[in-house]
Amino acid sequence: MAKLKREQWFDLTRDVEWEFTHVDHEAVYPEWISGTGKIPLDDWKQWKEPYVTSYPEYVATQAEKDAGAYSVKAALERSSVFDTLDEGWKSAAKMHFGGIALIEFIAVPAELKMARFGLAPSWRNTAVYGALDEIRHTQMNMWLAHELVEKDPQFDWTQKAYHTNEWGIIAARAVFDGLMMNPNAVDTAIQLPFTFETGFTNLQFVGLASDALASGDINFANMISSIQTDEARHAQQGGPTLEILMEHDPKRAQWVIDKTFWAAARLFSVLTGPAMDYYTPLEHRKQSYKEFMEEWIVDQFVSSIESYGLKKPWYWQEFLDGLELWHHSLALGLWFWRPTVWWMPKAGMRKDEREWLNEKYPRFEQEFGFIWDQIAENINNGNMEQTLPATLPWLCDLTHLPIGTCGAPNNPKYPIKSYPLTYGGRTYHFDSKVSRQIWWEDRDLLHQNSVIHRLLGGEIAQPDVPGILAWMGLTPEVMGDDAEGYAWAAEYLPSERVPAAAAGGGA
């Protein structure tokens, strides 16, 4: 039999659909999980993916990408590249592996939800490839990091993190549950492929790969680049879904995007902000986190949503102002609460690094400089207990991040304060009016209790710092400490106390 040409069979295979005779449509595609809402079923026939591929083409492309990624890894296995990496960059890699690797796996059921309950056959077909992508991403992350465990046990948190109660992981789990596990198929397509992947991860991966390459971590850069090409393809499920939703329910589309962008922006201020502005070696920083966000996230996101007829989120100015504050507060908090994380936080406070921060963020000294000065003084005076936590920070009941990280001590517009709300006989606390409003609207979909509520509820048997660390799964060999062994603080010693060698080096 002659082999058919692609154009003779492709459209048929990607658009297979049939009428049900033994059950009604609602039984196969329940509203609560398909999410069609106000959209007539016939309108889903308009759904068309921008990137068209067949299964043989998909397999051939992925095999080629895998061969490239794994061959680079094999070539570097016997090298000493890892040993020469800056400790700050290693911490950025550990943050990524622990915070993202298993999220790639959580994305598999999110894609399969759309593959099963998506309301257009071509959408379901595309989502199958998305699920295969996410399995591949999980495997790449976990295999690459596993090879590093023998060099540094903190890399074991690539596999372990999401099986613990570590506070940052609880925060990430809350966000990703809201993106992937809780929504119906339509909302998932708007939240995950469109807002999160197109709006954040695709662009962030480009920046992360560039920083990794500049820092000398060729393996990591190669892996991220390989993953990003998959993300760029299956993220396009969001566009066709959004077009159809905008025709019938633009208010719903606006709300889904607004709440997702806020949650993603807050989370990325932990995952990406400190990595770019504090952990990446100064000589390898191509731009600040704020500059990166303004160029790649803000401009691209606004252009994208406006092309669909959407408006900027109602909190837009607060988000823009947050680019000056959020990640600095979180970098400071990660360093202070360093025993509660699985990497080595870098202070990033050597004088040349601090000068760079002041150049990029003119209010940095006023907002945060005096706190770092006090920390350096405590280190130099041997008062290490003053640089370590005695309790947990006040956490937001939506983002699960410290409430103070939406503001700064000397900022009259965004002071450090809680925005409480009493509901069902319980008082909830939030880092902003925005978080409070999102929680109120989505309260029936949110099921993660913060560490503070778990502590007050008696879930942590030993309610002190050692007991909390044990509950989080942090053992002495993996809990964080200063990435530079506190050497940076010597630059802040009074001149008469600077060792001769240090003085000769221009400290």
Image (tube, rainbow, N blue to C red):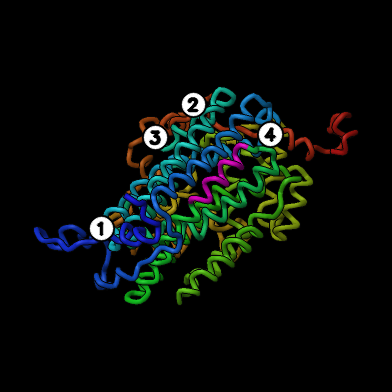
Amino acid carrying label 1: it is Ile
Of circles 4 and 3, the one toward us is: 4
For disc 1, the neighbor class at 10 Å (few under 14, some 14 to 19, many from 20) is some
Mark 3 vs mark 1, foreground winner is 1
The location of residue 363, given as percent across then percent down, is 69, 60
Q: Which residues are magenta?
A: 219-230
Secondary structure state at the residue bearing disc 1: helix
Label 4 – label 1 distance at C-alpha? 46 Å
Mark 3 or mark 1: name the one nearer the start of the chain: 1
Q: Which residue has dot 1 on it? A: 33
Ranked by sequence position, the earlier of labels 4 and 1 is 1
Q: From the viewer's perspective, is residue 40 above or below residue 11?
A: below
Q: Say if 123 sits above or below 150 in the image.
A: below
Identify the image quadrant of the C terminus.
Answer: top right
Q: Is residue 266 left or right of residue 381?
A: left
Q: CA distance from mark 1 to mark 2?
A: 41 Å
Say above or below: 229 vs 472.
Answer: below
User: Which residue is identified by label 3?
Assistant: 163
Front residue (pair 488, 265): 265
- Residue at left offset 75%, top offset 42%: 350
- Mark 4 in CB contact with mark 3 (< 8 angstroms): no
In the picture, measured across the screen, residue 412 lies left or right of residue 104, that is: right
Q: What element does badge 4 sit on?
A: loop
- In the picture, measured across the screen, residue 179 lies left or right of residue 359, that is left
Give the residue at x 25% y 58%: 33
Identify the disc placed on residue 475.
2
Residue to which mark 4 is pinned: 85
Mark earlier in primary sequence (2, 4):
4
Front-most of 101 and 469? 101
Q: Nearer the viewer, mark 2 or mark 4?
A: 4
At label 4, the amino acid type is: Leu
